[in-house]
Image (cartoon, rainbow, N blue to C red):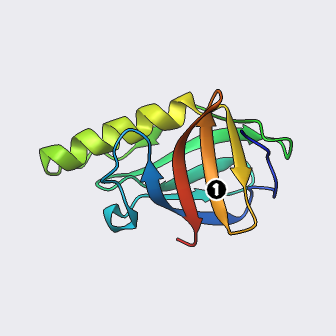
Amino acid sequence: LPTGGAELADTKWKLSGASYDTAISEANGITLDFAAADASGNAGVNTYNASYTSATDGSLTFGPIASTKMAGEQAAMDAEAKYFEELQSVTAYSVNAEGLLDLFAGPDQILTFVSGG
């Protein structure tokens, strides 16, 4: 379950797993970088940004996502669309001692990131 943890501002992450696709890995190049009030990154094909709100108790939500509109292979475009859909459903997060960021939709863990980026 989401437990919160470290402040997210000024952190960088690389996607290492997704509940919707077990083939998602760091090799896909999906990143999530948190600044003071917005998040940005690479979604595999396009770059994106969105506002976010979080608290160290574990709550986290993202605002509307804006992205570049480059085209890529259909499989990559489909994965990117699903990633954006998942980000929009996020309600909470946990940062654990091993340096993993887990994002949750309700009680369900949906995205896992490793520190870096």
Q: Which SS class for mark 1?
A: strand
Quarter placement of the N terminus: top right
Q: Can residue 14 be seen in this view?
A: yes
> Which residue is pictured at 64% across the width and 26% down the height?
106
User: In this view, which residue lies farthest toward the left?
Assistant: 73
Q: How many labels does the image show?
A: 1
Locate residue 89: give its quadrant.
top right
> Which residue is pictured at 32% across the width and 56% down the height?
44
> Which residue is pictured at 51% across the width and 46% down the height?
111
- Toward the viewer: 85 or 109? 109
Left/right of residue 54 with respect to residue 90 in the rendered view: right
Q: Is residue 64 visible?
A: no
> Which residue is pictured at 68% across the width and 64% down the height?
11
Write down the residue under mark 1. Answer: 101
Q: Where is residue 83 in the image (x, y as percent from the top left)?
A: 40, 41
Q: Where is residue 54 in the image (x, y as percent from the top left)?
A: 77, 41
Q: Position of residue 46 (x, y in %)?
A: 33, 52
Left/right of residue 97 with respect to residue 81 in the rendered view: right
How packed is label 1: few (under 14 Cα within 10 Å), some, or many (20 or more)? Answer: many
Q: Position of residue 105 (x, y in %)?
A: 59, 30
Identity of the amino acid at label 1? Leu
Note whether 8 is above or below 12 in the view shown: above
Left/right of residue 101 with respect to residue 54 in the rendered view: left
- Toward the viewer: 30 or 68? 30
